[in-house]
Image (spheres, coloured by chain):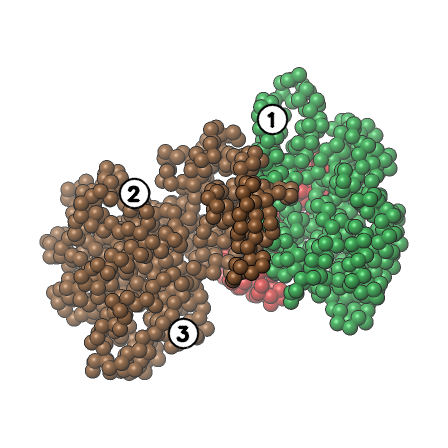
Amino acid sequence: MEAKINKTHREGAVLFSPYDAGSSIKKALEVGRENILFEVRESKIKGRGGAGFPTATKWMLVAAAKADKKYIVCNADEGEPGTFKDRVLLTEYPDLVFDGMVVAGYTIGAEIGILYLRGEYIFMLEQLEDYLISMRQNNLLGKNILGKEGFNFDISIRLGSGAYVCGEETALIESLEGHRGEPRNRPPYPVNTGYMGYPTVVNNVETLASISKIITKGADWFKTHGTEKSTGSKLFSVSGDCKKPGVYELPWGTTLNELIKIVDAENTKAIQVGGASGVCIPKSQFDRQLSYEDASTGGSIMIFNESRKMLHVLKNFMDFFVEESCGQCTPCRIGNVKLLECVERIEKGEYTFSYINSMKDLSRTMQVASKCGLGQSSPNPFLSILENFKDEIFRSKENGVSHA
Amino acid sequence: MPDTIKRAPVSQQPFKVEKPQDLNTIGGMISIEINEKKVSVPLGTTIYEACKENQIHIPTLCHHPDLCIAGVCRVCVVEVEGMRTLQASCSFPITASIKIKTTSELVRKARRNIIDLLLSEHHGECYACVKNKNCELQTLAQEYGVDKMRYGHISAPIHEVDNSSTSVIRDMNKCILCRRCVRTCIDLQEVGVLEAISRGDKTVIGTFYDKSLQDVICINCGQCINRCPTGALYSNDPSDEIWQAIDDPTKHVVIQTAPSPRAAIGEEFGQPPGKSFTPELNTALKRIGFDRVFDTNFTADLTIHEEGTELLHRLKKALVDKDESVKLPQFTSCSPGWIKFIEHFYPEYLDYLSTAKSPQQMFGAIIKTFYAQEEGIDPKDIVSVSLMPCSAKKFECNRPEMNSSGFKDVDYGLTTRELGKMIREAGINLPELPKTGFDEPFGEASGAGLIFGATGGVMEAALRTVYELVTGREVPFENLRIEVCRGFEGIKEASVKLENVLPDYSFLEGVEVKFMVAHGTANAKQVMELLKAGKLSDVHFIEIMACPGGCLGGGGQPIPTSEEIRKQRAKAIYAEEEGLPIRKSHENPHVKFIYEKFIPEGPCSELSHKLLHTHYTKRGRYII
Amino acid sequence: MLVYEKNSLSDEIEVLIEKFGKERSALLPILQIIEKRHNYISEFAQQEVARLLDIHPVEVYSVVSFYNFLHRYPQGKNIVRLCKTISCDMAGKREIEEALKRELGINFDETTRDKKWTLEYTSCLGMCDQGPAMLVNDKVYTKLDPETAVQIINDTK
């Protein structure tokens, strides 16, 4: 059936709790920039996209930068396999996201916000544009927002064109500037030299939505959720072998065992945490916590039950990286091809363990020497699946000659 | 150097940290540790530079001193304490007191792995490669101890070799995607033929719609060849045909040699840059079997006569006849890369070009007409070869209009590198050869012709002649050194005031002749944009060379290239010219002789137009 | 391409340039609209865009070739993009794949002879909780089974 946008009743302590559209903007304009920065810092919120960089640091660097123009970019290029939380936020909670962008714009001194929406989400474009129009009508966007003299801010939406790597913030900026989505050298970071060379904050959709809550309800309230180092709650996109797939808001620190129960999964063998670029966790480690300090994730949770072949899963992931690598740096462009080749050779039973070891060595090089996060994390599923499921992969008769 | 950063996508721009003016200010110097040794470097130095300063060699592939930063090959990664991943030393500016490790296990393994990965996709069969023994990938493999193809090795070529171009051949089977050619073409030269195409494992360097080079707007400058670290780009080599002609007793094979190859060919034989081998080269060419060896500088002198006269005609028309259709400034036309550039990008301005042929083509025409007649040889039996620093000359000599004698003016354009190969094939070690002069009837040329090889040289030569022609006095510069024409500044601009002129040129009395010199097509583009904007109406004469540094940095010159190397070659050229007895084109006795005997009506006459001038083609930008 | 077609395409691109400006950053929005209207971005269109933005044609080509949703060669009037990522794969992508291939009589990355349909794979569509999913032009369809997938195709015809 055609996917339609209809707000379903969702339960959650932070993001999915009641919110009055525009309230965070109102509050922000009342308390002023300094206090917003203080609250954001106090909340200890880290980027929700997966990398986990402290949001306050980004904001403070851009707020302090001297420049003619500054930009706030909302990264809605949600391409990580198994992630769809931003889809839910944008279609059902656009108020949280866009209010968060306005707050960010106000705080860092930007007049333009850009939502970079992945091309695959074009179906929600019209609704989002309509929502922006209504914000303009309510003076939540435009000139002198909510009567605040001199605070002008507007948001435009730019569509991606089908490239996973554009979720990497510097690739995203390249794409906005009309280039191939190839990640930049860092330093400089976008906070210094971002869109069009100006200081730019790039935040994930969920991060900005969380900001709206932090501003309205305060950092202290926010910190009552989650763990010491991973504050607040997290949206988890759950898919795969479970009865109730979907987006769940859970506090950081939830264990995988708890999660399985919530989503009603049976005979679970493995959970891929963090999407294709994440790690695959076996049953024996289901007591691990979802948090920045333990099993870190941008929200993708894929569940595999006993019937699934992990080598097939791994092949699917490596296929993905071979195609989605931007192709500029050597380790990622060629390395992923070699890892895929390795998976295929294991499938056929044409391997030696010294070959497997050299591939693991190559993986390590890719992790440290690739230019951006894509190449640095693409060996994660390779390493974790080969390590955690070696019995299944190397001792099974199905994969060519048995080496048991 | 041109501003290479302007057009580059930000991904390829270095982090611009202003280097402090005064390094003694606080924060001007930063102390860092490299491999546990404390050193101090200026703020903003890249790790690569800092290591180089401290005698630590970091391997690189995508990095090139002429180009902006790419940071894509990752061979140069090093460990920076406290950072999760390794950092590309070419693109990492030092702004804090960091600790660097350049040979830790992690770094060594990464380097090896990356080189192995590159080798796995590089269909390089070294012994059958034009870059054998001069390949950066080969050198890296050797230096970093590659002992086996750990990640396999591609066994057969998968890309078709594009040898459609008269000048540049692309073999993408050897490409390692360092993108130096892309940066050269788009940023350094602003021609924009090559870019990265597709994504992921399918990424290749390609042209618009993967068309062959002859079908896109390549200007044949060959700068991409000079910067390719492997054998993926090379010039279209005619040496086999030349050998054949030499072996053929019915053929009279002559060669003209341009000044720049003579100042660089030593590099092909392990000599440091900056030494000319003109007389040794003459010997080598004779031993190879060329029947005559001529000096292209002779027609460079001729060019000065023709182009200078043409300029004076234009000035007269503009100043005396008030003819508004006269196009000024007049542009030089010696550089075939530049000609193709203007034909493509500024076809509406072709009338500004001097109609004089380049020295190569003038010589070609003279050889198959005057020389053939003098020597009693049928021009069809003459094989005329030119030794050029240039890949675009190969295109030029194949232009259909270049056939004054009814035959191709010049049959083969041979580059410095290709001749180096021929000399080696002949079992000759160039530097140890005895010296020989050029053959009659053209003999030695003037120093003015010689300095054509460096950017500004044509202008300097023209000034020496035109000034003296107009005023009857030598140019007022010490030892004839017109310093304003020299040096590698992207665009140079100066003027000379004409006073107390001879009666014939009274219309020039008090005129301030304004001239400009630009090298590299990126700078040419800037000049053209100024012209377009109407800002050059007071300029009279502009010299443009397509290649950075002028011909001495041409696309046929020895590899590697860098500004330092080009400076050395320029030095060699200027040094050689000061030692010559004749240093002004109009004093070249052979040129006088040619005009008297062969073109009695003089420069820009009807016969001279037939032989020594040409016309241009409006090509435009549209790619069919 | 016929002359009048070229002229109308040039006019069309000029209008787009007026709307989005001459900055390089206008490139992708312009290409996206051309793609949408013509199902691909022709050689001529790429050169026109390059000319009007004052960049090189190969730069436009390079960008077009980078993004999955931009095409260098003509595609069918309708493009079906079936998600091939693991969640959809486990939810039954393969049956949908077979059904689509049979129904249209082509393989993936091919276009029907009547130029009506092109089949493509795509990476994750962000519909993992409702897989298998596919994108037909701008619309997302989820929880597919072979019959509904074919039905959708027939309804779109």
Q: Judge left or right: residue B608 versus residue C132.
A: left
Query: In terms of depth relative to the viewer, which is nearer, B215 or A346?
Result: A346
Q: Nearer the viewer, mark 2 or mark 1?
A: 2
Which residue appears at 61% of the width and 30% of the height?
A: A360
User: Mark 2 sits on what residue?
Assistant: B269
Q: CA distance from mark 3 to mark 1?
A: 66 Å
Rendered hue of chain B is: brown
Which residue appears at 55% of the width and 45% of the height?
A: B38
Query: In terms of depth relative to the viewer, which is nearer, C87 or B153?
Result: B153
Given the image, on which type of amino acid does mark 2 rest?
Phe
Q: Judge left or right: residue B59 versus residue A382.
A: left
Secondary structure type for disc 1: helix
Rendered hue of chain A is: green
Secondary structure type for disc 3: loop
The C terminus of chain A lies in quadrant: top right
**At which x and y percent is residue C102?**
66, 36
Question: Would you identify the image quadrant in which residue B368 lies?
Answer: bottom left
Given the image, on which type of amino acid does mark 1 rest?
Ile
Which residue appears at 23% of the width and 70% of the height?
A: B465
Given the image, on which type of amino acid does mark 3 rest?
Leu
Rendered hue of chain C is: red
Question: Would you identify the image quadrant in which residue A340 lies?
Answer: top right
User: Mark 3 sits on what residue?
Assistant: B536
Q: CA distance from mark 2 to mark 3?
A: 44 Å
**At which x and y percent is residue B333?**
32, 63
Asked if marks 3 and 1 fall on the same chain, the answer is no
Q: CA distance from mark 2 to mark 1?
A: 46 Å
Dot label at residue C58 = none
User: Mark 1 sits on what residue?
Assistant: A356
Q: Are marks 2 and 3 in contact (CB under 8 Å)?
A: no
**At which x and y percent is residue A223?**
85, 49
Q: Residues within 10 Å of mark 1 (few under 14, many from 20)?
A: some
